[in-house]
Image (spheres, helix red, strand yellow):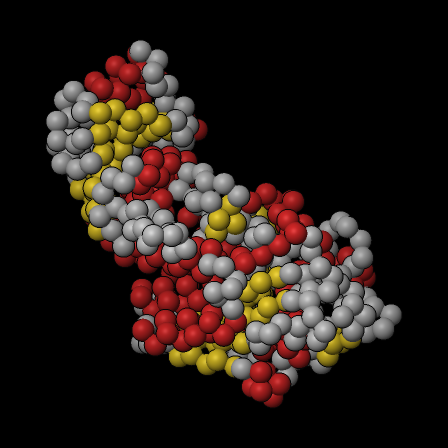
Amino acid sequence: MSSVDISSQTGKDFAGDALIVPVFSGRERHRLPLAISKVARQVMDEEDFKADYLEVVPLHHPNGVKESRWMVLVGLGDEEKVTLNKIRKAVGTAARFCLKKKWKKIGVLSPSTSTLDHDAVQVSVAEGALLANYDFVVFKGGKPEAKQFSSIEIFTNGDDTRKARRKLPMIEAGVLACHRVRDLANTPAGDLYPEVFAETASKLAKQHKLHCEVMDVPALEKGGFRSVLAVGQGSARPPRVVKLEYKPKEKPKKHVVLVGKGVCFDSGGLSLKDASGMETMKDDMTGAAIVLATLVACAQLEVPVQVTGLLGLVENMPSGTSYKPGDVLRSRSGKTIEVLNTDAEGRLVLADLLHYAGELGADHVVDLATLTGAALIAMGDGVSAVMGTDQKLVDHLMDAGGAVGEHLWQLPLVEEYAELLKSPLADLKNITGIRWGGTITAGLFLREFVGQASWAHVDLSGGWSGKERDYRTHGASGEGPRFLLEWLMA
């Protein structure tokens, strides 16, 4: 992790590779320090830079800013329309530009605006710069060194920095967790399969003094995790369930169980996906990665909440031993499930884990899963769907997501749709057989296994980005731990 500092200085004497200057369009640019304002005004007057949102213009050796080798102007657009998330993304966009140039020492001038709280702006600036500071080169040839900033200095032009500086540990822990999720979800399935994922979790648990229990096939059979075992039985890589536990030193405010879908590769099983549908299916374990990264961050931050994490780790593969369309599974809860499509496997894994979670006496249960393509169609890849049995819990999760720029949108659990899950052969079927409402009916299926728990389900449509944009790289977005930490620390 790069060193980060927040200073009340103006930034005009910054001695580094590049100074990032967020600029509002129009008259507001006079709020910049004088020497920097002159440069911005000149290029704007010449119409080389209009300060449109996310517009980036690099300037070499700008007049009046003698120490910095480069100044990078980034547009914020109209001040009246600016939000903390726009600032976060604008700074991230400029920081990605700097990272690609292999610049090591960057500064960022925190924008001054009358519409937003200055402390919150400083936090968003730090988050944008740090979230952009990521380069996954593990599988590149020639052992290239990952591009990374050595230091990030944030200048507030006289504004008080004390509140933002106090939040730095949480910002850094959240970003580190985000990057850990990116690392795990970007790793090919041939290198990260259930056994390796479980070993990774065990190592991190030992490093951060988390209790860790890994359940192998005999333990899963003994524990009644029959749905998990069914999904994994077609693969040469046997499944694992990992239980992680964090307990604060003082009496916890509450107990939360986080449940993560960890399908390390999803071929669809015998209901085989087409080739293009498999291209990104190494990321189908993102929910489990989020849970693991969040538990580690909880230990680092010493959050005042007891948190248990459950990771359901499987591969869904076609073979002579695969579970089949038409099979009836007896889940851990005792409810039977008619399998109509083996590509609706994540809900089968979560069914057993949610039932187990309900036995742990938690105040809240939250599961996270790349569960349905329907969520991606409805939300796009910038918003995740959330639903649940406890409106206050759902509201708190959405508020936390909005605060950190990881947006959640609530979908209803429409009672009438539950009829679509009834099976003539078993208690439930794993798909409805119709095309519409797939995210909602998946949520209703999961609800059958949570008992009386205060429960929320997050369908991670924002877990993967098909292209680089703002602070997000191509591939795994890493979203999840930051909004969970915001909620847990509230």
Q: Is residue 223 above or below residue 458?
A: below
Q: Which residue is drawn at the image coordinates 76% and 70% (left, top)?
A: 324
Residue 268 image point, x, y percent:
68, 61
Q: Which quarter of the picture shows residue 172?
A: bottom left
Q: Which residue is drawn at the image coordinates 50% and 41% (left, top)?
A: 467
Residue 117 image point, x, y percent:
32, 39
Q: Which quarter of the picture shows residue 36?
A: top left
- Residues 330 and 8: in front is 330
- Residues 85 and 436: in front is 436
Name the side, left or right, on which 116 lies relative to 287: left
Residue 251 image point, x, y percent:
36, 76
- Residues 49 and 31: in front is 49
Q: Which residue is drawn at the image coordinates 67% and 50% (left, top)?
A: 374
Q: Residue furthest front?
A: 142
Residue 383 image point, x, y percent:
55, 46
Name the quarter where the N terminus is drawn: bottom left
